[in-house]
Amino acid sequence: MRAKRLTGSVAGVLVLALTAAGCGLSGGSGDGDATAGGCKVDKGNVGSGKLTGDVKGQITFQTTNLKKDFGAFFDGVIKDFEKAHAGAKVKWIDDPGDNTFTTRTVADAQACTLPDVVNLNSETATALTKAGYLLDLGVKDPDAAKPFVPAFWKSSTMTDSSGATVHTVLPWYTGGIVLTYNTDLLTKAGVDPAKPPTTVFGLFADYEKIAKAAGGTFYATMANPVWRIPADFDQMNIKTLSDDGKSAVFAKDPRTVQWVAWMAKLYKEGAMPKDSLSSSNDPSTLYSQGKVAYGSTNPSFVRFVKQNSPSVYAKTGVGQQPFDALGHTTGAPQYISVAATSKHAPVALAFAEFLTNAENQTAWCKDPNVVIFPTTTASLDDPFFQKVSGNDPFAQARKLVAEQLKTATAYQTNLSPAVQNAIVAQVQLAMQGKKSPEQAVKDAQDKADELLKQAG
């Protein structure tokens, strides 16, 4: 997801709803009050100047579907914070994270009851920033950036109602991307596992070698382009959306047609199972059965193979997903924000920074029940991410992602499901030979534009 962009029908509704409710930050009346998003707040919460005040009072901290699996960990973080700050209390609530999350968060903001510290995704954070409901962390604490990977901090920005770029979020945990493959199958196809391709089209060329060598006895990858759009475009530095996110522009880049032509060619030549073109199944099952050479790019997939198919795990290699024209990877972090409407903003800001500091991020990422990665420089240098003993693909994947994240940005393109599906459908028609790649790309952009226009 691109932190600077808000796209998709739900996100568009969010912006409109919040703007109607009152947007921006303004100075208050003679009694020293100010407003944030239409709510009366302490004047220290808005405008210029570092946030000051005692770290005392009770705040509410909201996560998204974390209490069931990580209750003990966060209870410990809260206890440590309260011990360090006498007079501060943290009440933890956990949102289920269902498909009404954004609606409920909007309602909280409009009612001036947004939790003091809240775990947000990019879309909701962008909308709340535009409407003025989140604390400008870069202004309220000029040192807020210090713990984080510089590229991640720089790219974790939102846009306020005036169009200015602001830091209203602290990047929290994120995922990663790796190239996973069956070394035996690659060797059979004449592909050197020790030399991963550096471009997406180079990877496609390896897929083609596998198709020719395997003759249908095994495959290179899955066919459904939903797994690759817009990820491949991002990595190739193909611009998918306009800067304001209101129109599609990918058809302007000639490499988009080349990409679709490759996909159609690979499908025709048997690099992908024919029945996987519209399947929502990821490669996990077929890979674990030794029938697909390349697995998922998600590092947690490597652990899945380790737990479910030891024989295939022993043949699994991990490499760098092609950087291509972008030159680095991108992440889609979860964020921590502080409500500008908080009655105890000094407590909320202190807790948000405590929660996301290197010590607590590292501790959580070491939990054996989760495969996530931290966004602080010190965490990524921890031996947990850097040491690989023996030939352990999962440990190798962890180290590889940790190294990637040192230069990664949060600029993943965010497409609504409707827009993504519209693009995917046209690519599928080209792969089936029902449209030329040129026509499929043109039609995909037209349909995407129509949906983006409807979303506002």
Image: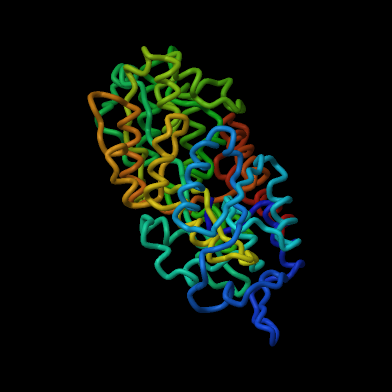
Figure check: 352 above or below 273: below
Is residue 447 depicted above or below 140 in this figure?
A: above
Q: Position of residue 75 (x, y in %)?
A: 52, 42
Above or below: residue 21 compared with residue 287 = below
* Residue closer to the observer: 173 or 91: 91
Residue sitting at x 43%, y 12% = 217
Q: Position of residue 25 (x, y in %)?
A: 64, 75
Residue visible at 31% across and 21% down in the picture: 183
Q: Position of residue 279 (x, y in %)?
A: 60, 25
Examine the rendering and report whether any part of residue 382 can be seen: yes
Report the residue at 57% width, 50% height from top.
119
Circle count? 0
Whether residue 279 sits left or right of residue 53 in the image: it is: right
Residue sitting at 44 percent across and 34 percent down?
A: 371
Scheme of image coloration = rainbow
Query: Residue 446: x percent and y percent?
Result: 66, 51
Relative vertical location of residue 412 with respect to residue 425 in this rendering, above or below: below
- Residue 129 visible in rendering: no
Q: Residue furthest bottom?
A: 30
